[in-house]
Image: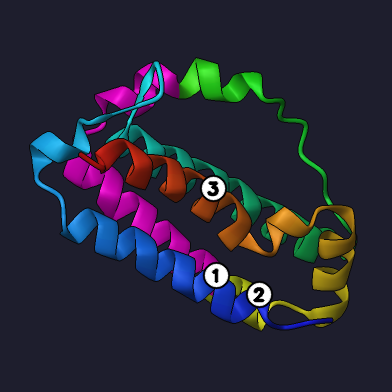
Amino acid sequence: MDRSFIERNRLSTERIRLLAAGLTDEQMQTPVGEHWTVAIVLAHLAFWDRRVMYVLDMTERDGKLFIPEIDIFVNDLSLPLWAAIPPREAARIAIQTAEELDRRLEAYPPALLEEIFTYNKRWVVRALHRNEHLDEADAALKP
């Protein structure tokens, strides 16, 4: 399996860290789209990275791919909860979760990781999901 995901994930985690460190609390409340803010983007990333950690836990426990039944409506249902998280706490959770997930993916059993990747490469190459939303946050923050 191509292990370039390790560096891509590390760079996207660093991007989260740099974004959070460079913003004021007021900037963290900058709208990103109609309903989101930069802080909500960070909370969203933490949530979905934690979902992947759950997939890793259950897949490793069972010795075969575990596919959780979560649909896209989870974003809409979670929005009020994410909005209630203080911006700096959303940043802390996003960074901590991304770092933990990056370490887990790097050390994960290769055969199981390959099975997960084959089913959904975005569960392994977290940079794909992270960078998509970080690009949106960066665009919203441009003057």
Q: Which residues are magenta?
A: 79-102
Question: What label sits on residue 132 in the rendered view?
Answer: 3
For disc 2, the marked residue is: 5
Q: Earlier in the sequence, mark 3 or mark 1?
A: 1
Q: Nearer the viewer, mark 3 or mark 1?
A: 3
Q: Quadrant of the N terminus?
A: bottom right
Circle 2: residue type? Phe
Q: CA distance from mark 1 to mark 2?
A: 6 Å
Q: Residue furthest front?
A: 143
Horizontal side, residue 93 vs residue 131: left or right: left
Q: Is residue 100 above or below residue 41?
A: below
For disc 1, the marked residue is: 9
Q: Is residue 85 magenta?
A: yes
Circle 1: residue type? Asn
Q: Nearer the viewer, residue 128 or 59?
A: 128
Q: In the image, what residue occupies the spot 60% across and 79% down?
A: 6
Q: Earlier in the sequence, mark 3 or mark 2?
A: 2
Q: Is residue 3 above or below residue 33?
A: below
- Which percent across, then down, holds residue 106? 62, 80
**On the image, which quarter does residue 83 sit in?**
top left
Circles 1, 2 touching at the beta carbon (< 8 Å):
yes
